[in-house]
Image (tube, helix red, strand yellow):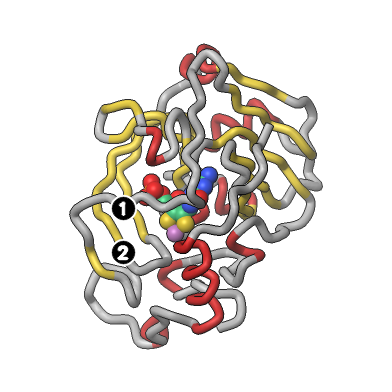
Amino acid sequence: MADELPEDSKLTRSKRRWAEEGRFLTGRHLRPDEEGLPPGQHLVQDWPVLDLGRQPDIPLERWTLRLFGLVEQEVTLDWTAFTALPQAQERSDIHCVTSWSRYDNDWSGVSTRTLLELGRPLSSATAVMLHSHDGYTTNLRLDDFLAPDALVAVRWSGQPLARSHGGPARLVVPHLYFWKSAKWLGAIEFVADDRPGFWESNGYHLRGDPWAEERYANH
Ligand SMILES: Nc1nc2c(c(=O)[nH]1)N[C@H]1C(S)=C(S)[C@@H](COP(=O)(O)O)O[C@H]1N2
Ligand SMILES: [Mo]
């Protein structure tokens, strides 16, 4: 399913270095203020694109989403089956670990709770690993994955989600840094242990709560 990871881009190398240096850390979560943004974040009006240097092209007729791992029954949804599921709408903010935030993004798609009912994970499943078509992976605790405003989004601002932003379908988990929101999502693996994905193996925090400045593994 997932392709090989691309060669490291300049951005990927910079982000690895920022994790080593502890770039953007303020320590301000220890003395919260009234700004309305997580510490060390600034607001942008545009919407930056971040990826590993490859934006896979997945035609809708070949698109699938697979639920596997510690589940009662493995499920593979095609586009028709996925879009026939109850559609959720959520407005939420984006907080990228590279320090930009963007308010009021209107997403629609399928709630992660709806997907859970289909996948029926075993009680031994405590976390998920997300697998994307560019070879990217990221991990989430099951409770974070199932946050009430988390969804697999196929539309943004009423339009089909652009390929550059992870279309046809991406995860959106707004209460964590945006690297947890896997673009070009292909599979959700239910697992027993919360193990690191791509950025979590490259200096970034296992969980990534922006309000607690959980940017890096070692700072
Ligand atoms: N498949 C995949 N998902 C990904 C990434 C990636 O490189 N590949 N980058 C992550 C990072 S670091 C960020 S900040 C956001 C960027 O999403 P955007 O390009 O829509 O702003 O996607 C996240 N999800
Ligand atoms: Mo990011």
Name the residue type under label 2: Trp
Query: Which residue appears at 48% of the width and 49% of the height?
Result: 53
Instruction: Determine whether 144 is above or below 24 in the image.
Output: above
Q: CA distance from mark 1 to mark 2?
A: 9 Å
Disc 1 + disc 2, Cβ < 8 Å:
yes
Q: Which residue is mark 1?
A: 48
Q: Residues within 10 Å of mark 1 (few under 14, many from 20)?
A: few
Query: Which residue appears at 52% of the width and 53% of the height?
Result: 180
Q: In the visual, does 18 lie left or right of 92?
A: right
Q: In the visual, does 118 lie left or right of 103?
A: right
Image location of residue 37, percent across then percent down = 28, 68
Q: Nearer the viewer, residue 135 or 217?
A: 135
Q: Earlier in the sequence, mark 1 or mark 2?
A: 1
Q: Which residue is mark 2?
A: 100
Q: Check mark 1 vs ligand 1: CB closer than 8 Å? yes or no.
A: yes
Instruction: Determine whether 132 is above or below 58 in the image.
Output: below
